Amino acid sequence: MELKNQVVLVTGGSRGLGSETVKAFAREGAKVVINYFNSEERAQDLQNQIGDHAIALRADIRDENEIQSMFHQAKEHFGKPITTVVNNALVNFRFDPVTKKDASSISWQDFQGQLESAIKGALYTVQAGLPDMKEIGYGRIINIGTNLFQNPVVAYHDYTTSKAALLGFTRNMANELGQYGVTVNMVSGGLLKMTDASAATSAEVFGMIESSTPLRKVTDPAEVADAIVFFASPWARAVTGQNLVVDGGLVMD
């Protein structure tokens, strides 16, 4: 399906990588659902920038009923169902190497919070979208990972573990859903410059990444967003169960 015929949901779509992903899909002519939880003003501003091809809808990705309602609202608004889901939302996390919890202080609740953000959120969006995807014989699920579970330069225990689990989720769903014309892939950026989540990262850390990356630069959100669009495009129609690392070559898998 061409991008211009798709209805794309971007969870956590009001800021950072989510905002750039919304803009990238809109640039290609897709209709976009901007999901937000707390950032209503940013979501509405982004909707106004894009115009009729966008709608901002509030939903907590950890709440199954709210996700189901969002899918229904989007279908009513655009007159056709969501075809493409980008599971991007990040709940209650900042990349702060100074204040992060170490192995002796991190709790199971910390892990559980990030697992609910990554796995529960992705599960609910897949389940909400699957009936329509099966009916039309088409769907695209793109989960947002991280290069940290391959190269944990900073030990963000809860976040990194949840994203590693999300890769397992991605490949299991790819295996099962391919028969219905649904592909499931992951895009894993490195530390991005600059998002709200990475705002606490020091200049020294950014400099270290820049100097050790083949492209000699820190990846920005718009570059990752273009890779996300690729997985929804016709050019990726035979690709599923894959994890594409977009970090300037810092991690070579």
Image: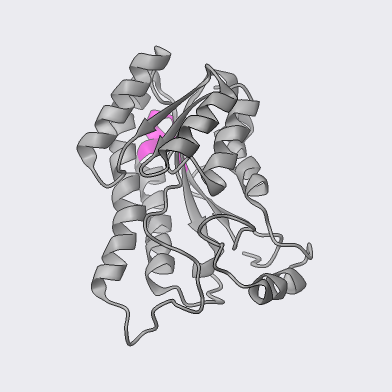
Q: Position of residue 109 (x, y in %)?
A: 24, 69
> Residue farthest to the front?
41
Q: Position of residue 92 (x, y in %)?
A: 37, 59
Q: Colour scheme in the image?
A: one colour
Instruction: Say which of 135 and 158 sits in front.
Output: 158
217 displayed left or right of 126: right
Quarter of the picture containing the C terminus is bottom right
Quadrant in the picture for residue 5: top right
Confirm whether the magenta stretch covers residue 179.
yes
Instruction: Say which of 166 and 180 sits in front.
Output: 166
> Residue farthest to the left?
65
54 displayed left or right of 210: left
Give the residue drawn at x 42%, y 61%: 163
Is 155 rendered above or below residue 33?
below
Q: Position of residue 82 (x, y in %)?
A: 40, 25
Instruction: Say which of 185 and 54 sits in front.
Output: 54
**Does residue 32 appear anywhere in the picture?**
yes
Is 55 rendered above or below residue 144?
above
Give the residue drawn at x 65%, y 45%: 222
Q: Which residues are magenta?
A: 177-184
Q: Position of residue 199 (x, y in %)?
A: 56, 62
Give the residue drawn at x 47%, y 35%: 43
193 displayed left or right of 174: right
Is 221 rendered above or below residue 126?
below
Quarter of the picture containing the N terminus is top right
Give the residue drawn at x 70%, y 76%: 208
Instruction: Say which of 229 and 239 sits in front.
Output: 229
**Does residue 239 appear anywhere in the picture?**
no
> Residue farthest to the top?
79
128 displayed left or right of 93: left
Confirm whether the magenta stretch covers residue 111.
no
